[in-house]
Image (spheres, coloured by chain):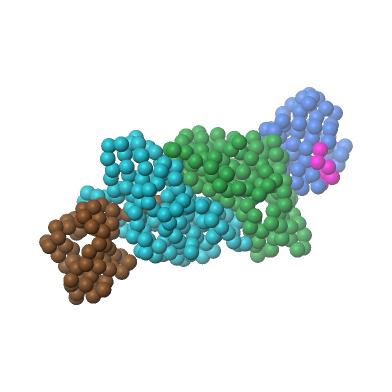
Chain colours: A blue, B brown, C green, D cyan
Amino acid sequence: MIKVLFFAFLKEAAGRESMEVEMSGETLADLKKKLSQEYRIENLETVMAAVNEEFAPDDTVLEEGDTVAFIPPVSGG
Amino acid sequence: MIKVLFFAFLKEAAGRESMEVEMSGETLADLKKKLSQEYRIENLETVMAAVNEEFAPDDTVLEEGDTVAFIPPVSGG
Amino acid sequence: MNYEITRDKIDIQDVIDKVISRNAGAITTFIGTVRELTHGKKTLHLFYESYEAMAVKKLEEIGREISERWPDAKTAITHRIGKLEITDTAVVIAVSTPHRDDAYKANRYAIERIKEIVPIWKKEYWDDGEEWIGNQKETVAYPDGRPEENELND
Amino acid sequence: MNYEITRDKIDIQDVIDKVISRNAGAITTFIGTVRELTHGKKTLHLFYESYEAMAVKKLEEIGREISERWPDAKTAITHRIGKLEITDTAVVIAVSTPHRDDAYKANRYAIERIKEIVPIWKKEYWDDGEEWIGNQKETVAYPDGRPEENELND
């Protein structure tokens, strides 16, 4: 199980702030594809992601228990 | 009568923080010479001066009632 | 805790107190406040959201980056989230260093990095709508380099 | 009174409050604190003296110079005089502007100008003596241009 977090406009677009996805041994790119195909959550291709609170590239292999957060362009400060 | 103010190291060198000098129609340069000759207050040549709280050049003509302050290099902040 | 995300009003002096040092001759602070007008449009209020656990880690990372570049610097950053009104303080950055040139530069470095890597998002509310600030048009990937000049001035 | 000379401890928030504005997105402060070590020499405490009436006028003049260069800026400066201990605050400069780049630049401008034109003098006390800081050797006239690089970092 992978925990997925959404923030800001993505949270509104996805209609939820978190979800759990059954997958293991696949990559972040695979997760994005799955979210688009199965949950109709679009526009993730160009959004940065963090795995376990650290920015991670698309080829990162996800393991059971990982937390993936999609990070829209930040606007703090 | 001209009022003269000394600050910082000049105050210590002059042994006083203010004095009054009888002069009128003469320049700041004349005042410096007078302080050096009559009062042995040295080292005024290269020190900036303010007349009535505004920086003023050596050729400023002093008038009765003016306040002259000698301003050593500042070190606030 | 020199790096904090809070839902409460920020006490600026508290942030400054964290960086006071016998070796410091200069402390700079940056205080980000909610401005009413942006590009002539009137903001009613703002809402900040964060990925809090990661945001604190990223603030700490900025502190480490500053310590690498300015070894004598002490840094503290507090960012507020939730609803903020006009003139409210959104972020306070305090940096102390022995000499002032470093205090200005390190402080500026911190705010630029916050706008690059810290997962905090701002939503602006106007009379006629609301919008998450950042690039919501999905046309630009997350900037990993220096911010653009116009962002620098925002 | 945005420009003050005081004998009392400076309340930093009070100085900041003077520049808060609905048009401000950024407030920078510079806080000059008494550092223990300068060039490896241990300072015990400092004493600041001022030509108070003129010092206030010169602080006001700096505020006007900032308003000419950064028309939207609001500035407040308080300088403390008298005896100050290590870590005490000698000066607080607060500048608010709509955008942060100006707030940093205008603030830096203010401290450099204070060190050029405001009649305030610092005396340092060490274990083995005391000295008025500045050029007491009478070899250099009052600087009317930009300060030297080494002064910039002091």
Q: Give the answer, above or below, for where C145 lies relative to A59.
A: below
Task: Please tell me which residue is depicted at 42% across the width and 54% down the height of the picture.
Answer: D7
* Rendered-image quadrant of the N terminus of chain C: top right
Left or right: B39 with respect to A22?
left
Task: Please tell me which residue is depicted at 63% across the width and 48% down the height of the picture.
Answer: C10
In the rendered image, is residue B56 in sight?
no
Task: Please tell me which residue is depicted at 25% across the width and 55% down the height of the picture.
Answer: B11
Q: Quadrant of residue C16?
A: top right
Depth order, front residue of C103/C133: C103
Q: Give the range drawn in magenta.
A: A13-18
In the rendered image, is residue A19 in sight?
yes
Left or right: A67 with respect to C152?
right
Depth order, front residue of D22/A77: D22
Depth order, front residue of C55/B28: B28
Depth order, front residue of A76/C78: C78
- Residue projecting furthest to the right: A38
* Rendered-image quadrant of the C terminus of chain C: bottom right
Q: Is residue C143 magenta?
A: no
Q: How many labels does the image show?
A: 0
Left or right: D48 with respect to D108?
left
Percent from the top left, x then y, of residue C78?
62, 43
Percent from the top left, x then y, of residue B72?
27, 56
Q: Give the answer, above or below, for where C92 lies relative to A35.
A: below
Percent from the top left, x then y, of residue D75?
50, 60
Percent from the top left, x then y, of residue C103?
47, 44
Q: Quadrant of residue C64?
A: top right
Q: Quadrant of residue A20?
A: top right
- Residue projecting furthest to the left: B37
Q: Give the answer, above or below, for where D33 lies relative to D94.
A: above
Task: Please tell me which residue is depicted at 27% across the width and 68% down the height of the picture.
Answer: B67
